[in-house]
Image: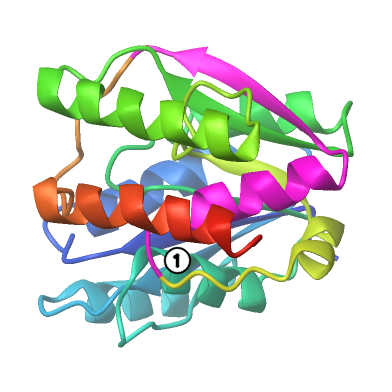
Amino acid sequence: MTDLSVILPFRNQADHLGPLVRRYLDEFSPHPWSFELVLVPNACTDDSVRICREAASADPRIRVVENPQGGWGLSVRTGLGAARGRFVCYTNSARTEPAQIPDAFDRLRDRPSAIVKIVRRGRGNFLREFGSFLYNLECRALFRLGCRDVNGTPKIFARELLDRVALTSDGDLLDVELLSKARRLGWRIVEVPVEGWKRHGGKSSTNFKSAGRMYGGALRMWWNGS
């Protein structure tokens, strides 16, 4: 079995997708553990799907599973469902530096019943930082989560957790669903702080409307006992 499966959703990132995938391969290849990259084109309307397929045809460590419906949560769940690794990782491919994942994975192997995740120290945008602060404050109050950044990725954890949490969120609430269910099972959440970083390319889908849906969605999730 593969040691680590890394799920990389892509939403209209054709301008940098190919070089970014090569960076993952170059960064992971020297390590002693085996890996696969599971590329998930997320309702793409550009050339991302073709580039993903070409990358997969050129390297057996790359696989492609598409999510034509769209949605962050559904894209992650689609990738996790196809993953073959003993450990799994998912991340925001537009912002993640590949070099951060091996260090986080090394920390996890000493803590099998934990989720290791990256947390950014700064976002470089006051409104985004303030909105994130409010959302994380809400999640800490509702779900008793002690982590600083609920949505921070990469997140890495043992595959066995997937069978126990039964994730259902199709949208942006997937992260709080995963962490809250893991906490109730007694799994630790280990945060690795890094400095904020810039997007590799593409455009963020976060806006006031989507932020409002997240605030209200978290409250409904708590109310329904999810």
| Residue density around tag 1, few if under 14, some if 14–19, many if 20 or more, within 10 Å | many
Q: Which residues are magenta?
A: 171-195
> Does residue 134 appear in this view?
yes
Q: Is residue 187 magenta?
A: yes
Picture quadrant where residue 51 is located: bottom left
Q: Position of residue 203 (x, y in %)?
A: 10, 50
Picture quadrant where residue 213 is located: bottom left
| Residue at 46% from the left image edge and 60% from the top image edge | 220
Residue lying furthest front in this view? 223
Q: Quadrant of the C terminus?
A: bottom right
| Residue at 22% from the left image edge and 22% from the top image edge | 130
Q: Position of residue 192 (x, y in %)?
A: 58, 18
| Residue at 63% from the left image edge and 31% from the top image edge | 145
Query: Up-down: is 117 above or below 123?
Result: below
Query: Up-down: is 21 above or below 72?
Result: above
Instruction: Please give the residue where the numbered disc 1 appears in the rendered image.
Output: 73
Picture quadrant where residue 61 is located: bottom right
Look at label 1 and name its amino acid: Gly
Query: Up-down: is 201 above or below 195?
Result: below
Q: Quadrant of the N terminus?
A: bottom right
Query: Up-down: is 141 above or below 148?
Result: below
Q: Helix, strand, or loop for circle 1?
A: helix
